[in-house]
Image (cartoon, rainbow, N blue to C red):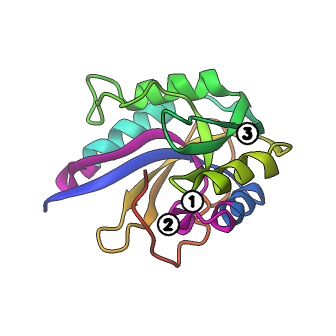
Amino acid sequence: MGTVTVGVSIAVPEPYGSMLQQQRAGFGDHAAHSIPTHITLLPPTEVEAADRPVIEGHLASVAAAGQPFPLKLSGTDTFRPLSPVVFVRLTEGAASCAGLQERVRAPEGPLARELNFPYHPHVTIAHGIDEAAMDRAQEELADFEAAWLITGFALYEQGVDDGVWRLIREFRFPGRPPLPSVPQQGMSRPAAPAP
């Protein structure tokens, strides 16, 4: 069956997800249309396609042991000059995201892997575009704020031919009503692969 590239993330709900995606596209970041607005728990990771049932079982176990937590986004920051990224900051819920991503990447699990950089939960709003556009993104969304209750996360797979990230399955924490449909904002246009 070969390999596929997967990622695990927390989707930013509407109306915030589409608004941030449109802003990202407006800054000239063409990847915006292939990536639903999200907080990464597992970055793009190549796995054997045949391992998907085991991966989904692992993620279901992670979700079953989890619990809802509040999350708040507020203001912007950047990883420059280390990495060409501008992002919206998490001012609440970062520690819960960090614990969740550690369980997703558990050494004994099917998604065990090292990260290229220390984990820092965020919502990317510009990546790899010119410096002036990155500055504009950081300035224009400096007052952005949003808050909601995290009730689960989702598994995505990247399209081989178009680089678009598509929802495979949602994983809910126990004891909560079903999640609204996980956003798949603007997934109609192909663009560059996720960073």
- Tell me the SS state at disc 1: loop
Residue appearing at x 18%, y 54% in the figure = 50
Any part of residue 66 in sight: no
Between disc 1 and disc 3, the foreground one is 3
Magenta-tinted stretch: 24-52
Tell me the kind of residue under disc 1. Answer: Pro
Residue appearing at x 53%, y 78% in the figure = 188
Foreground of the two, 91 or 77: 77
Q: Is residue 3 above or below residue 76?
A: below
Residue 166 magenta: no
Location of mark 3 (residue): 76
Specify which label sits upstream in the sequence, 1 or 3.
Answer: 1
Residue 50 magenta: yes
Give how far across and how far down residue 180 sits, in percent: 68, 57
Any part of residue 48 in sight: yes
Tell me the kind of residue under disc 3. Answer: Thr
Q: Is residue 134 above or below residue 188?
A: above
User: For residue 182, which quarter of the picture?
Assistant: bottom right
> Tag 2: Cα neighbours inside 10 Å, few (<14), some, or many (≥20)?
many
Location of mark 1 (residue): 36
Q: Is residue 51 above or below residue 74?
A: below
- Tell me the SS state at disc 3: strand
> As drawn, is 15 to the left or to the right of 166?
right
Alpha carbon separation for disc pair 3 and 2: 22 Å
Alpha carbon separation for disc pair 1 and 2: 7 Å
Residue 77 numbered tag: none
> As drawn, is 26 to the left or to the right of 127?
right
Tell me the kind of residue under disc 2. Answer: Ser
Location of mark 2 (residue): 34
Give how far across and how far down residue 126 sits, in percent: 60, 52
Give how far across and how far down residue 127 sits, in percent: 54, 51
